[in-house]
Amino acid sequence: MIRWLRILFLVVLAVVLLTVALAHRDPVTVRLMPDNLATFVGTGWAAWSMQLPLYAVIFGGIVAGLLIGFFWEWMREHKHRAEVRRKSKEVKTLQREVSTLKSKVETGTAVGAPKNDVLTALSKSA
């Protein structure tokens, strides 16, 4: 059921995007800077402009906004990823220590390890 809802949503989204694209086919001029500011700066790159269909500008703005949002969220979550990395290293270190201590207890070389064979057997079975 969920799969069909997802497919239906994607079809509706495609129809809406296609309708927007067909309704906004007229070319527009996209400039890097406004004309007055470009003449004030006086360099050639400031007067850069390009003719694009309006739907390309709209969809480009949506994609740029998504990319900026993804990057912002990635930067915001950096502290959480660093904490997970630190905890993961700590867990690995503790696991190594536990396995070392278990092997010492099994061989009877651990400090405070039971010296009695019965107690050793009971500690191994527990």
Image: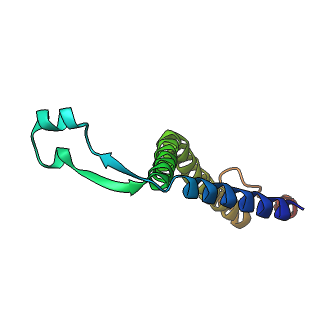
Q: Is residue 117 visible?
A: no
- Spot the residue most to the left: 42
Residue 42: quadrant of the picture? top left
> In the rendered image, which quarter contains the N terminus?
bottom right
The residue under the point 10% across, 44% down is 43
The residue under the point 54% across, 43% down is 83
Provide residue 72's location: percent of width, then percent of height: 48, 42
Q: Is residue 73 above or below residue 53?
A: above
The residue under the point 17% across, 38% down is 38
In the image, 59 versus 114, the foreground residue is: 59
Q: Is residue 91 left or right of residue 58?
A: right
In the image, 17 versus 62, the foreground residue is: 17
Q: Is residue 73 visible?
A: yes
Provide residue 66's location: percent of width, then percent of height: 52, 48
Q: Is residue 14 left or right of residue 39?
A: right
In the image, 119 versus 97, the foreground residue is: 97
Residue 102: quadrant of the picture? bottom right
Residue 95: quadrant of the picture? bottom right
